[in-house]
Amino acid sequence: MPSITVKNISDFKEAAAKLLENNPGRKLFAIKGVMGAGKTTFIKAICKELGVKDNTGSPTFSIINEYLGQNGSKVYHFDFYRIKNIEEVYDIGYEDYFFSAAWCFIEWPEKIAGLVPADTVEVEISVNGTERVISY
């Protein structure tokens, strides 16, 4: 399993580029890690790599943010931390997003484990002191 060590916030850019480069054709990513591990920061870096010009942030309360990447590609950022039950995920029409061939980045995928497609790239961000280790 490849891993990338992130020593400071500026290293997330290189880590994002490597993740995308090492997973050509893959567009669905489940990002796991403890609270404060850097999941949102990493997804922001990925969005920049994809040419997103919008301000990016955590969709903690809205569950999903939508952005436009280069050439008009759609980028969806999910945060399932605050869902109370699986019906909320059904209500947002998760299948329309996950199976759309658009870029999808999912924070807290363990909260919807049975709904995450089998071909999703699983990414784990581990905290090691002040460093982050991103494995996929």
Image (cartoon, rainbow, N blue to C red):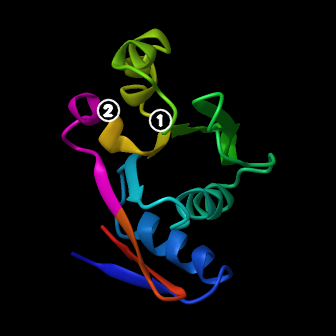
Mark 2 closeness class: few <14, some 14–19, many ≥20 residues within 10 Å? some
Quadrant showing the C terminus: bottom left
Apparent side of residue 50 relative to residue 39 in the rendered image (left or right)? right
Horizontal and vertical percent for residue 21? 43, 69
Q: Quadrant of residue 61?
A: top right
Residue that mark 2 sits on: 112
Q: Residue at x 47, y 40 (%)?
A: 104
Apparent side of residue 130 relative to residue 98 in the rendered image (left or right)? right
Mark 1 closeness class: few <14, some 14–19, many ≥20 residues within 10 Å? many
Horizontal and vertical percent for residue 93? 45, 14
Apparent side of residue 92 relative to residue 56 in the rendered image (left or right)? left
Q: Quadrant of residue 85?
A: top left
Is 90 magenta? The answer is no
Which element carries disc 1, helix, strand or loop?
A: loop
Q: Amino acid at mark 1?
A: Phe
Horizontal and vertical percent for residue 59? 64, 38
Q: Where is 90 relative to 106, above or below?
A: above
In this picture, which residue range is highlighted in magenta?
112-123
Horizontal and vertical percent for residue 100? 43, 26
Q: Residue at x 45, y 16 (%)?
A: 88
Of residues 16 and 60, the one nearer the viewer is 60
Q: Are marks 2 and 1 in contact (CB under 8 Å)?
A: yes
Quadrant showing the N terminus: bottom left
Q: Where is 71 relative to 48, above or below?
A: above
Q: Which mark is residue 80?
A: 1
The answer to which of marks 2 and 1 sits earlier in the sequence is 1
Of residues 118 and 51, the one nearer the viewer is 118
Q: Residue at x 36, y 59 (%)?
A: 24
